[in-house]
């Protein structure tokens, strides 16, 4: 016997006729249907789409403890899936913010390097200008000394 009751949406039609010959086949077919897809149940050959998941039905929970447990499990699973979806969304937002921060840091680093290069170039130009000034001052002082008697 199975933990879950047989329902029309979960088993093939040939399993509903239960005789002594087919009782042993029932478990074998149930196991084979869960492990491999038969051609008659594939979505491409069936005229209507396959139903996936539990059917949406009202379950009377007042007297059936097993039904209450299943309902509780479904509700818990639904909440858990919602929490996991929320966490996945949060992780995606965090990844995007990390990417943005990394791009900003790389841009800031590029600007810093560019500023350093500009300051080095300016320093080099100032050094060249001061050397030219010193050379011109020296030439001018020699000229003045040579023109004096």
Image (cartoon, grey):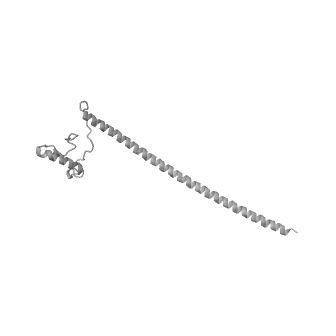
Please state if 128 lies on the left or on the right of 4 as rendered: right
- Judge whether residue 35 can be spotted in this image: yes
**Quarter of the N terminus within the rendering:** top left
Residue 23: % across, % down: 14, 44
Q: Position of residue 119 (x, y in %)?
A: 64, 57
Is residue 58 in view? no
Q: Residue at x 38, y 43 (%)?
A: 85
* Residue located 57% across and 54% down the image: 111
Q: Position of residue 38 (x, y in %)?
A: 21, 51
Q: Along the horizontal axis of the image, is 12 left or right of 110? A: left
Image: 64 above or below 24: above
Q: Nearer the viewer, residue 137 or 2?
A: 2
Which quadrant of the figure has residue 90? top left
> Height in image: 116 above or below 84?
below
Task: Using residue 122 as the reference point, say whether residue 81 is left or right of it.
Answer: left
Q: Quadrant of residue 127?
A: bottom right
Q: Residue furthest right?
A: 149
Work out which residue is located at the far top of the displayed protein and give it.
62
Residue at figure coordinates x 61%, y 56% from the top left = 116
- Percent coordinates x, y for residue 101 in the rendering: 51, 49
Q: Is residue 122 rendered to the left or right of residue 145?
A: left
Rendered residue at 79%/66% (across/down): 140
């Amino acid at each position: 016997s199975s933990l879950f009751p047989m329902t029309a949406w979960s088993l093939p039609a040939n399993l509903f006729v239960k005789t002594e010959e087919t009782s042993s086949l029932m478990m074998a077919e149930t196991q084979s249907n869960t492990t491999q897809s038969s051609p008659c149940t594939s979505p491409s050959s069936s005229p209507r789409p396959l139903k996936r998941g539990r059917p949406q039905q009202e379950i009377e929970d007042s007297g059936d403890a097993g039904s209450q447990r299943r309902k509780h499990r479904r509700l818990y699973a639904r909440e858990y899936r919602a929490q996991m979806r929320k966490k996945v969304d949060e992780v995606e937002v965090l990844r995007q913010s990390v990417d943005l921060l990394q791009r900003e840091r790389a841009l800031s680093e590029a600007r810093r390097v560019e500023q350093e290069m500009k300051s080095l170039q300016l320093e080099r130009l100032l050094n060249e200008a001061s050397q030219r000034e010193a050379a011109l001052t020296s030439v001018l002082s020699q000229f003045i000394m040579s023109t004096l008697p």
